[in-house]
Every structure is written in structure tokens, then in C-alpha cells.
Image (cartoon, rainbow, N blue to C red):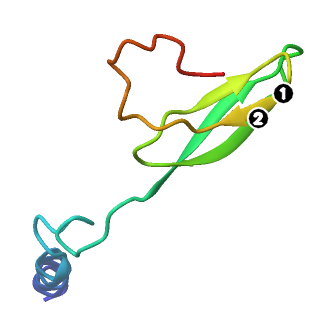
């Protein structure tokens, strides 16, 4: 009797989990990303950029920037300033 009840409860739990449902299926998507860098002394720094931008951090001036990712493969080679 106990074994039958345990199997029925386990089966009900497994069937209640949606199969294959992800955040994309629910209509959610990411719009920002967390960028991580470190200073010259090794102190961690975090900042946020949009999903279509690059994460850039200048260790000398301690400034972060998020340049556009559109001209990434263009003639301009110096992207992070």
C-alpha cells in the first residue's frame, strides 16, 4: 500500500513538471548582460551593458564602456577605448 502511494506521488510530481519548457518558450529574453573585469590591483569590477554591445574596461582610467557591436569587423580595429 505504501509502495503504491509513493509511486503514484512520484508519478504525479514528474507529470506536473512541464516538459521542454524554457524561458524562450515563455516569451522571456535577456536584454542586458553582466560584464566583469579587474583593476590593475586585481580588484573585481562589474558593470552592465546591453545584449548587443561589447564589454570594455580600461584598467588605467578605471572606466567601463559599452560600444556598439555593429562595426565589430569593420576597418576600425580599436574598438574599446
Q: Secondary structure at mark 1?
A: loop
Asked if marks 1 and 2 touch (Cβ < 8 Å), the reply is: yes
Q: Quadrant of residue 60?
A: top right
Q: Which dot, 1 or 2, sits closer to the camera? A: 1
Q: Quadrant of residue 3?
A: bottom left
Report how far apart the C-alphas of labels 1 and 2 lie in the structure. Answer: 9 Å
Q: Residue at x 71, y 40 (%)?
A: 46
Of residues 18 and 64, the one nearer the viewer is: 64
Q: Badge 2 local density, few (<14 within 10 Å), some, or many (20+)?
A: some
Q: Compare marks 1 and 2 and give the one earlier in the sequence.
A: 2
Give the labeled residue for mark 2: 45
Give the mark count.
Answer: 2
- Callout 1: few (<14), some (14-19), or many (20+) C-alpha neighbours within 10 Å? few
Q: Residue at x 49, y 33 (%)?
A: 54
Where residue 64 appears, as percent x and y from the top left, is 72, 34
Kindly give the residue lying farthest to the right in the view shown: 41
Left or right: 6, with 36 as reference point:
left
Badge 1 is on which residue? 62
From the top left corner, tell me how far across and down residue 81 is, in percent: 66, 22
Q: Point out the image quarter for the N terminus.
A: bottom left
Residue at 27% x, 66% y: name it.
Answer: 23
Q: Residue at x 89, y 15 (%)?
A: 41
The x, y position of residue 59, in whole percent, is: 79, 18
Amino acid at each position: 500500500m505504501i509502495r503504491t502511494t509513493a509511486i503514484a506521488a512520484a508519478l504525479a510530481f514528474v507529470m506536473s513538471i512541464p516538459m521542454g519548457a524554457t524561458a524562450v518558450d515563455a516569451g522571456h529574453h535577456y536584454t542586458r548582460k553582466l560584464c566583469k573585469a579587474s583593476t590593475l590591483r586585481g580588484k573585481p569590477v562589474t558593470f552592465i551593458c546591453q545584449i548587443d554591445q561589447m564589454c570594455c574596461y580600461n584598467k588605467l582610467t578605471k572606466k567601463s564602456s559599452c560600444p556598439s557591436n555593429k562595426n565589430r569587423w569593420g576597418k576600425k580595429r580599436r574598438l574599446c577605448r
